[in-house]
Amino acid sequence: MKYGKPTMEQMTKSVYEIDTTAPAIVLCNYGYFDNNTFTFTHTIRIKILKKEGYSWANRTFRSGSSTSVRGKTFNLVNGKIEVDKLSSKSVFHQEIVKNELFVTKISMPNVKVGSVIDIEVSYPWIPLNWYFQETIPVLYSELVLERNEYIDYTKNSFGYVKFYIVEPNRWVTKNVPAFQEEPFMAPVDNYLSHFEFDITGVSIPGRVYASFARTWKDVEETLGGSKYFGAELRGSSSFFNGMAKQINASYDNEVDKLKAAVDTMHVMHWDGTNRLYASNLAGLKNSYNKGTGNSADINLSLIKLLSKIGFNVYPVVLRTRDEGRLSKFNPTISNLNYVLAYVKVGDKFVLVDATDKDAPYYILPDRCLNFEGRVLASDTMNWIPLTNNIKYQKQAFYMLTLDQDDLSLKGDVTYAYKGYAAYHFRKDYEEAGTQDNYIDNLTNSIDGLTVVKDTLLNLKDIYKSVKEKATVEIDNQCFASDSLVYLNLLPGRLKENPFKQEKRQYPIDFVYPKSFKTTVIITVPENYKAVTIPSPKRVKLPGNTAAFTYMVQQRGNRITLLYQLKINKSFFLQQDYKFLKAFYEQILEKENEPIVFKVL
């Protein structure tokens, strides 16, 4: 491919025959590191096939401190190719870590269905990553890294795509299909076929030698020497001394002191960015006084405060879920983007994040639940699981009456949300903005549901379970045919199996163990005689990794459903897929099995 020279065949292409659903395709993706100039050049050509593909005209690249960008949009007008050049006003360079990590954002001009886009980005240094697969088809991808005697680096490989050409410094793929998301997956970057690179050392004879990430100890030393990490933790402490003195004077036990320290950090507003390093040299005190900061500003401040209070606390560095899995065996700095506090409370250690005011100290945000993190500054600990062993638990209790006239269900429901269920309830309620908006969302979550009255308890107390009491009416759960009435017992039941594919190429990720327990009591009219009652069902996966119980009981004109679903581990491998698919098939069948009445 030559930049700025699309072919007429590419311009007239209106559909990708192999995948007619594709909104866009990558025609060519080419990267080349020039050993002589120390420059990496990334050239990509994209064809827009549908309006849904417009987002591919807005690109973000990890780049270097000195980055040049050019781009062109080509459109076929009356048989001739017209060109719109990328304006410098539509190129945005952002410094993520001062003098170390940058991103370049591009918004291409005059993009339409049928457009071809060429983008070329050049910067000194080798790339941090290279993607051979995207969520749209990639017809051709090639990466060439000329070997340089002065730069040592490691390469991590991810994904399942087979290479067309593999040479010592050259890799090529052809006709890679679009990555297809499936239910219960980690973010896409965990699965896309790609390389990640880390500089381990630079050696220029007679001038300089620097070792960056040959070992995890190197990583720890580099972070310890950073002005935006280690120096912040070692810096002047008078500001945090005052906070610590006040907390120690106000509380006697460690749990209350830890809660107070986290609450103190909640004064700061998290700006939504995940960072390993503090944001500026003015210090953590400056970020606290501003009342806003990135995740490192907040959590490094927490670590410092906990240390001053007297806790045994360590930094834990990690990679968030959206960025992919962190390799224990290939030391890296560039792929780290978050830090947590690992603090000893009593005789146990707990991971703590202070960025979210809706989370108690023992709840980690989903973004942090990503396999393992690296403990720094400890002689006895290296790698720890990124979990606090908290489950997602939701309980529901329905007390309903079947109206013989319109076959609706009327009554009350009580919900209890614990652990991650409570955390996400608070986040969803906050996102809804108002009580009315929340009730609209609740109504839409169950087919035929109308909420007459709704009361919430413990919404603001993050250390208590959220409880919800509602008066409801539910339609579409019951229908009549001739002299028979069919009643579905479980509101919000599954409509389809979430696992539809015959085979699955990727692991199944539930994020955390989950538990759903529902009791439904329905009083039916006296003249309803049950002729078919669903039989009991108990299913367990091997090793009790998941379990399902379904039982219907009848006493007079009162029907009781006892329902329980437990997912006892968060992560399943591909070979477990067939068991999970069959497991959910039995759940679906039982949830949709009605009780049948004869009307006397």
Image (cartoon, rainbow, N blue to C red):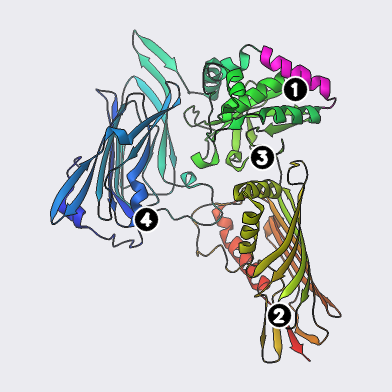
Q: Which of marks 1 and 4 is nearer the N terminus?
A: 4
Work out whether residue 353 or residue 522 is closer to the camera in this orientation and state it: 522
Quadrant in the rendering for residue 87: top left
Q: Is residue 568 visible?
A: no
Q: Is residue 472 left or right of residue 45?
A: right
Residue 407, numbered circle? 2
Quadrant in the rendering for residue 409: bottom right
Q: In this view, does 527 lie to the left or right of 287?
A: right
Give the percent coordinates (x, y) of residue 278: 54, 23
Amino acid at pointer 1:
Phe
Q: How far apart are marks 1 and 4 (CA)?
A: 52 Å
Q: Which of marks 2 and 1 is in front?
A: 2
Q: In this view, does 427 lie to the left or right of 503?
A: right
Residue 52, numbered circle? 4
Residue 387, numbered circle? 3
Q: Earlier in the sequence, mark 2 or mark 4?
A: 4
Give the percent coordinates (x, y) of residue 266: 67, 31
Asked if marks 2 and 1 touch (Cβ < 8 Å), the reply is: no
